[in-house]
Image: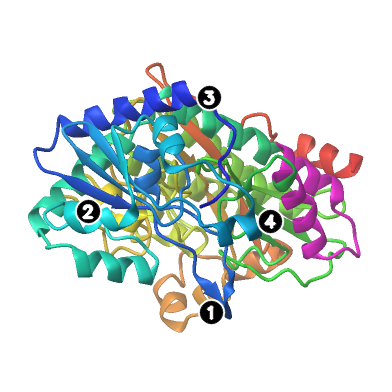
Amino acid sequence: MTAMPAITSHSLADTLRRRRQQLAKQLDFPVVLWSGQSSARNFPANTYPFRANSHFLYFAGLPLMQAAIHLEGGRLTLLLDDTTPESALWHGPSPSREQIAEQIGADAAFPYSHLAKLAPDAATVLVQDAATAAEQLAILTLHPARDHALAQAIIALRLTHDDAALTSLRQAATVSVQAHKAGMAATAVGKTEAAVRAAMEAVIMGENMTCAYNSIVTTHGEVLHNEHYGHRLQSGDLLLADVGAESPLGWASDITRTWPVTGEFSATQRAVYDIVLAAHDAAIAAARPGVEYRELHLLACQVLAEGLVDLGILQGQPQSLVEQDAHALFFPHGIGHLLGLDVHDMEDLGDLAGYAPDRHRSDRFGLKFLRLDRPLQAGMVVTIEPGFYQVPGILQDPARRSQYQTLVNWERLQQFQDVRGIRIEDDVLITAAGSDVLTAALPSNTKAIEALVSRG
């Protein structure tokens, strides 16, 4: 059993009861959700950090290890073993099962072994760790139709966030902003990417939070999920940092900024950065309830294409260029994703959460990596993260070169070799009136970015 984060038990219990009651309105059958367990790293006592399953967290609230909850008619039964004397020897005292049950507003609590009596006819969502998934399959009688209905019910609840969730999301965003400012201040020629990463993650750890995902801190921003940190920062480099905090109860933040190592963008870097920023700002300005997220993506693509035509990199009419996916040579991913208990919220359910019913992923070059294709709703939190990347695997691909030969001024593009990758990402809450940028305290314009780096 893990140590519990400091929270107000009454407010947590009330929030969890409301969530369970909302689920009960949609389902007329029992549900069991597992928290999962830690996985061994080379030997049993050395484990990877434990992270409770997010669907469990949504209804149980606390990151309990090797626990489960039974939900039926709005009632919650907690299945959890009390800690053993041996565990207390190594990890210290923990609250009892009954104390935890009271904290989360459970209606009953039993040892974990009681699962065998409650689980067989229940619907569930499979967890990620292999040991617990195997246990689920051994205990459960699978009901595919019920499991699908459960997934749809959970999606309906988790697509928008209640006040308790938004409070945690704002806390994670605040810490992430501080981390990025620390990263800018720590940037200097001769340092390693790892040193900047350390400065950023130190802020997150210092606030008793964890990273919501593996940090990206790199001078090779053309590698979209670069997790190597050994390069030394050189004059003329851009540093791309995609780093976000996760609150003690599991709520995520996701911010990306790109800044010049010397504190001053070159003319070519500034020109491309301002295009990406224009796409970022246009998408956020257009975000409001009822707007299709796909349209925000296409709007950002259009703004990016217009800017690249003005720079002489792309050739043709911007709308036609987007229709032909020429912009995707430089912006191959989607404009963002859902954000909540996971940094890519509910993507363990595949496209079931991200795509509205009867919608499917496109196979188009410029749309196939779009993670969210739904109309926006008040209470949703999404990321907006356009970018520009010179990915060798794309730009040097013979088939792509042939397809887009006349749409790209390849000689002009050579003049922008100091721009490997730029991404600007913020977390955006959709409100009844429009949107609220949860990460707005971190500047994104070039002058403010330069000032933060130079001051450091």
* Quarter of the figure with residue 61: top left
Q: For the point 38% across and 59% down, which residue is it?
A: 369
Q: Nearer the viewer, residue 354 or 271?
A: 354
Residue 194 lies within the magenta run: yes
Amino acid type, mark 2: Thr
Residue beneath disc 2? 124
Q: Is residue 263 at least partly visible in the picture?
A: no
Residue beneath disc 3? 8
Q: Which residues are magenta?
A: 178-204
Q: CA distance from mark 3 to mark 1?
A: 56 Å
Amino acid type, mark 3: Thr
Residue 183 lies within the magenta run: yes
* Residue 110 placement, left or right of 273: left
Q: CA distance from mark 1 to mark 2?
A: 46 Å
Q: Nearer the viewer, residue 262 or 57?
A: 57
Q: Which sits earlier in the primary sequence, circle 3 or circle 4?
A: 3
Amino acid type, mark 4: Leu
Q: Nearer the viewer, residue 242 or 413?
A: 242
Q: Which sits earlier in the primary sequence, circle 1 or circle 2?
A: 2
Q: Height in image: 110 above or below 156? A: below
Amino acid type, mark 1: Gln
Residue beneath disc 1? 396
Give percent across and percent down for residue 45.
59, 72
